[in-house]
Structure formats: C-alpha cells, structure tokens
Image (cartoon, grey):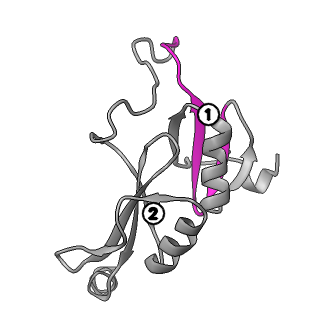
Amino acid sequence: MNLPDAPIAHEGFFAAHFFTVKDQQKSRDFYVRILGGKLIKPDNPCYIKLANTWIILNCGGGPTPDKPEVILETPSNLKRVNSFLNLRVADIQACYKEWGDKGALFLTEPLPNPDGWEWRCYMRDPDGYIIEVGQYTKLAIDWFNSHS
C-alpha cells in the first residue's frame, strides 16, 4: 500500500463514504475509470481515493457484533434516497461530457438551481446510488468569499 495515500488517521480523523455494492469490480471501475479515483486497495473492502475524500466499497451482509441489528444492502427502491455523494466541480459542463462519454448515466443534463446558487445534475453509480454533481455560481462564490 502506498502509505502517503493510505486511509490512516495519524491524528484526528479522515472522512470516507461507504457504499454497499453488489459487484466490487463493477463499482470499482466506475469510481476509478469514470470519476478518476485512485485505487488503493482492490477488494474486501475496496479503498479508493477520490479527489480529497475516500470511497469504501464492500459487499452487503448481515449483522456483526459491532452492528448487531444492522443489515447492509444496496438500494431497494431507486426512487427513494436518504443520502448521496455530493461532488463539487470547477466545470460542470466538462464533467458532464467527460463522464458521460465514459458511460456515466445522468438523470438530466446540468440545470441551473432556481435560487441562482449553483448548476447541478445527478448521476447513478452501478448500484443505483445517486451522486450529485454541482458547480457554484458567481453568486455563491461571492457569498463564500464575503463570509470567510
């Protein structure tokens, strides 16, 4: 393992998003080939460094001693979502084209948010998880700059 890229907290902590997947190889291909993640550990669980965060992919399963009543499973109803990965990008049109050309399935093209704060679109990974792709507008960037 490449230690500078290992998901090891030497102090404090690091954040990662865990996905329960049906097929680690198929999901790994999506996050590495389409989104440009760096594969750190290939399976059981799979670790991917994705920009400035981490993705962990592993198959589902039943309860374990540390989560005694929890079953990990992929989404059962793709029309209902309670959590999603949010990617903030510098150029949403370029990402939409590049990732779409590589096979990403978007729900719509990038659309402006009615409040003028951002452009965004959503795609699905191989297990149906929703991923928001958003780009802040000048209005949002000016607000962040004035409140920092």
Mark 2 vs mark 1: which is more N-terminal?
1
Does the rendering let one see residue 59?
Answer: yes
Q: Nearer the viewer, residue 102 or 64?
A: 102
Q: Is residue 75 above or below residue 119?
A: above
Quarter-wise, where is residue 22 in the image?
Answer: top right
Q: Nearer the viewer, residue 54 or 134?
A: 134
Q: Nearer the viewer, residue 128 or 43?
A: 128
**Outermost residue toward the left?**
115
Q: Is residue 89 above or below residue 61?
A: below
**Residues at marks 2 and 1, CA–CA distance in whole angstroms:** 23 Å
Instruction: Give the residues drawn in magenta, as a range.
Output: 45-65
Residue at 59% x, 41% y: name it.
Answer: 56
Locate residue 53 relative to residue 73 in the image: left or right.
right
Question: Percent from the top left, x then y, of residue 57?
Answer: 59, 38
Q: Residues within 10 Å of mark 1 (few under 14, many from 20)?
A: few
Residue at 45% x, 31% y: name it.
Answer: 74
Quarter of the figure with the C terminus: bottom left
Does the rendering let one see residue 10?
Answer: no
Q: Is residue 8 above or below residue 35?
A: above
Is residue 115 located in the magenta-colored stretch of the structure? no
Badge 2 is on which residue?
Answer: 87
Residue at 58% x, 51% y: name it.
Answer: 54
Q: State the mark number for residue 23.
A: 1
**Amino acid type assigned to the residue bearing label 2 in the image:** Leu
Q: Nearer the viewer, residue 76 or 61?
A: 76
